[in-house]
Image (cartoon, helix red, strand yellow):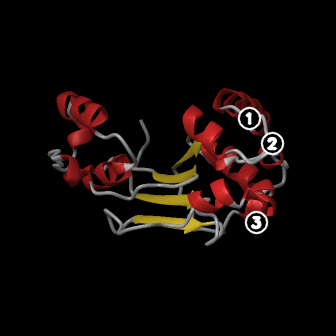
Amino acid sequence: MLPTPPQVISLDFHTDTLSAASRGLAIPAGAWQEAELLRNAIQTLHHDEHFDWALRTGLISRADIIAISPQVGEYGHPAMQVHPLSPEMTPETVLQSPEIIRHTADHALELLPEIQVSDPFILDIDCDFFLTANACSLPPDSLFAQWVRRAAMITLSREDDWVKLLQLPGEKLSGNFIAQHLAGQCLLFR
């Protein structure tokens, strides 16, 4: 258990910033401490509404999502912010004109924005953030490596279907490969 609700820094191709209320969930403060309410939230939240739910219940203090694709729609909670790497990195561009975004995709970890990071924080990594094998190289002096060293917890989601759908031509990536590679790299930095 962390001493205070942590910030979450999430790397994701695209994050739905929907309100958890759209799923009809009860969101009382402290709900994450009640097993039945937590279990219900886990079973009910299907996209990224978990950020909104966690913020509204006090489980986390803020959510900063670094996304390949720009935000579409409104934010569910004011303490949630999406930081897109590039405005042209939409799913349509990736699927229809991948040559336009290859350079950005290859250097995604070098393009991470400087954001306010408060301890403790959770580093949440969705493997669909990595569209190319080149994007998986993790320089030990990078901002990402600093976050890995400082994070109270690191979570990894393979996102197998999205990795396969979004990978650029010539790539042979799988969510499992990226997760294993990143896990090994993260252990080196810790």
Q: Secondary structure at mark 1?
A: loop
- Report crowding for label 1: few under 14, some 14 to 19, many 20 or more residues within 10 A (C-alpha): many
Label ID, residue 173 = 1
Q: Nearer the viewer, residue 40 or 102?
A: 102
For image coordinates 33% across by 48% down, the residue present is 54
Label pair 1/2, CB-CB below 8 angstroms: yes
User: Picture coordinates of residue 117 (x, y %)?
Assistant: 57, 61
- Report crowding for label 2: few under 14, some 14 to 19, many 20 or more residues within 10 A (C-alpha): some
29 shown above or below 81: above
Task: Report which residue position mark 2 lands on.
Answer: 133
For image coordinates 14% across by 45% down, the residue present is 26
For image coordinates 84% across by 54% down, the residue present is 141
Q: Say which label, 1 or 3, has the lower sequence index.
A: 3
Label pair 1/3, CB-CB below 8 angstroms: no
Task: Report which residue position mark 3 lands on.
Answer: 100
Q: Say which label, 1 or 2, has the lower sequence index.
A: 2
Q: Marks 1 and 3: which is nearer the front?
A: 3
